[in-house]
Image (spheres, rainbow, N blue to C red):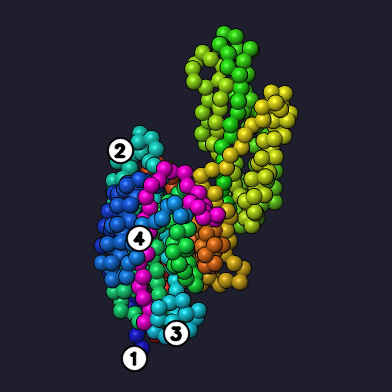
Amino acid sequence: MAIDWRSRVLDEVVGQRAAMVTALAEMIRVPSQTGTTAEHEAQALMATALAADGLEVDHWELSLDELRADPEFPGTEAPRDEGWGVVGRLPGSGSGGGSASGSGGGRTLLLDGHIDVVPPGDPTAWTHPDAYSGELTATEARGRGACDMKGGLLAARWAVRALAASGVPLAGDVLVASVEGEEDGGLGTFDLIRRGWTADVCVVPEPTGLDLVPACAGALTFRLRIRGRSAHASRRVEGVSVIEKLLPVVAALTELEARRNVDADPLLDRWGIAYPLSLGIVRAGDWPSSVPDRLEAEGRLGVALDEDPAAARAELEAAVAEASAADPWLRAHPVEVEWWGGQFASGRLPADSDLGERVADHHHTVTGRPVEVWGAPFGSDLRLLNGLGGIPTVHYGPGDVNLAHSPDEAVPLAEVEVTAQVLALLALEVCGPR
């Protein structure tokens, strides 16, 4: 009698729920902020966990100098002098067809998630004082990183652990990658690709609320510098305030944002602004009773789907130059534009890939509901995997993206379990039992 591997694997997912929910809480309790020692500690814990699940583990230190010298380096923002990669591999043992990228001759599925999280922000904005509590309720796990994206990374581990425990003889490999530095550019996935890890298809279980996201806009970090003329505040008209000179630049950027969002790709119709342009930090002056003569402003420029980042940069530079040209002081002292930090191009699943349909089918099998499809207005590792890596990639995962980077971040446990089930079924289809 043929073994019903789908049922067996799904039963394993359900049977391991208690252990995996506990593991998720433990992950959240590690404050793995981008660029910190705790980020590396979380990677070491993940490597140990994947090995305990029965996977072959590659745990390596990143060669940061070599990566930074790479012409396609995606950039970073957080200070960093160390980085680590982790890949767990459930090897295939068959001789199936496909692209033969797997060790058993079958196809390979990559599940790629980031372990790093952003800082918790103002602690008084959280209902509970410890943002890294990893508190569990009957319905959710709470804490910084629960949604973005330790819930999704745990779901990937859960799916592959269930596959390993079931004993299914796969024809191809299933890979679980835990990467650092996603929040500020994509360092970890960039190095993953440079190290030679590849696959036939990939799912990044970012928080999508169990919707399907086949495309992500990009995001480019920039810095503006404005020079003025200092004077005593009692004689402010003798000086030139850089704060006042910032105002026409902000007006020009606001107009640019509106212009760049005309006829945005329909995949992003659900968002009020598909390609936001904003300033996040402004620093000016050094004394309350002096006219400020130096200003730095840092912001983020959204990149349209399929747009060359160089073209997006040129548009912003032109808008700033026009604002400078219209002001007598700025005409003589133009605003300087610097591109630094994370440089996220946009990314999209190739039109000839059926990965989206496959994920949607398995979602329907597990939930009984059709999946919604939309594009994301933020940058992610999807663009590196689809573009640089040549691996057809989508987002599908647990949690509401509106809770990412926010106080009281949480992820529904039911969505984590559904994601694990869907990913396990996808692995069975892609990597195939012999």
Region of the chain picked out in magenta, as a range: 68-93
Gap between marks 2 and 4 measured at Cα: 35 Å
In this rendering, is residue 176 above or below 125? below
Return the residue nearer the eye: 234 or 68: 68
Cα gap from disc 1 to disc 3, whole angstroms = 21 Å
Whether residue 356 sits left or right of residue 254 in the image: it is: left
Residue designated by label 3: 96
- Based on the displayed image, in which of its 4 quarters is residue 149 positioned? bottom left
Name the residue that disc number 1 marks.
1
Which SS class for mark 3?
loop
Looking at marks 3 and 4 on the same chain, the residue that comes earlier in the sequence is marked by: 4
Query: Compared with residue 271, is residue 426 higher up or lower down, i.e. above or below?
Result: below
Q: Identify the residue position indicated by label 2 in the image.
A: 129
The secondary structure making up most of the magenta span is loop
Q: Residue at x 37, y 64 (%)?
A: 87
Tag 4, which secondary structure?
A: strand
Residue 349 image position (x, y, % from top left): 57, 64
Real-space CA distance between mark 3 and mark 2, rounded to the nearest whole angstrom: 52 Å
SS category of the residue bearing label 1: loop
